[in-house]
Amino acid sequence: MSIVPEVRVGLNALVGEGPIWDSDKRVLWWIDVLSSELYAFDPANGSNRTWDTGRHVGTVVPWTETHVLLALQDGIGSLELETGQVTIHNDPEFLLLGNRFNDGKCDPAGRLWAGTMAYDNPTDQGSLYRVDTDFNVTKILGGIGISNGIVWSADQATMYYIDSMSYKVRTWNFDPNSGDISGEQTLMEVEPDFGLPDGMTIDEEGHLWVAFYGGGKVCRVHAESGAVLDTIDLPARNITACAFGDDDLGTLYITSAAQQMSDDELAAAPMSGNLFSCRPGIKGVPAVRFGG
């Protein structure tokens, strides 16, 4: 796909992550995990409002007019937008001080699915959790390396999920009423030199868009065969996540990371950590806000 993404926010974020379009506020929420910052990018005026959450933040989803929901270093919390106050609602890993929450999204019923990872040498210390709308938390999967992208098909019958350390995109049968999953299968398996599969989103045709950390690209992946349909190359190597946004859901926003890069490496790849966007000619689907 011969598209040249443009820089929308030149931030050199350590770990830019979690982009999600808020159709009510008409902003793109995104984060810098290790800077503990939450952002709201407004494409209408180019502003990028910042909140300091006071702890590492793994993902953000829209919630109410006044709050967003966050998966944080120390549990599932919310941030009050006017004051910046953070409230922790549930921390299922309060005994696992070496872990933090990472990526997540809401399922079609408005339940948040978010997973964890170890700070040091992540292999199988993480888990995937489902956060019901009453903030009750259920552990769904264990033995996870780096919990990352998660999306659901339009018919709500399939859940797609990435544990980056597995180098796989996997699928499950999904029960939208109970939130239960079954019948795990592998959709896509990649070689390490292709990059770590990281965050992902889904388009209106039902296909996946997967960011590849260390691979410098986002790939459109066929939702049934796992074949790579198109590739968008970026001027940064560590690509973390992507999401469709703007009023027509026709803009693909892409986050990246500058963590652990030396001055020489940053000089060679100065756009690392930036927020990018492009118009791939395909539209996404509306994001689901937390239903609590």
Image (cartoon, rainbow, N blue to C red):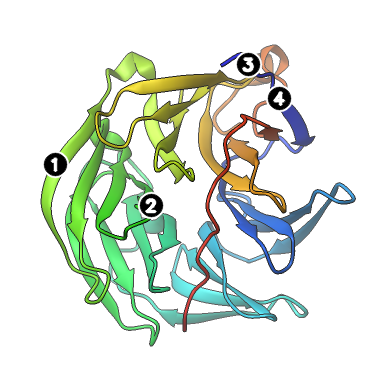
- Find disc 2 in the rendering and name its residue: 151
For the residue labelled by badge 1, is the local secondary structure a helix, a strand or a loop?
strand
Report the Cα–Cα distance between label 2 and label 4.
28 Å
Q: Residues within 10 Å of mark 1 (few under 14, many from 20)?
A: few
- Outermost residue toward the bottom? 134
Report if residue 164 is visible in the image: yes
How far separated are the C-alphas under marks 4 and 1?
A: 36 Å
Q: Are marks 4 and 3 in contact (CB under 8 Å)?
A: no
Which is more N-terminal, label 3 or label 4? 3
Is the Cβ of the residue at disc 1 closer than 8 Å to that at disc 2? Answer: no
Q: Is residue 231 left or right of residue 14?
A: left
Q: Which residue is mark 4?
A: 271
Q: Looking at this view, is 21 or 73 the one in front?
A: 21
The kind of residue tagged 3 is: Glu
Amino acid type at circle 1 is: Gln
Is residue 39 visible in the rendered image? The answer is: no
Q: Position of residue 143 (x, y in %)?
A: 17, 50
Task: Pinpoint residue 176: horizontal percent, then vertical percent.
Answer: 27, 70
Q: Amino acid at mark 2?
A: Val
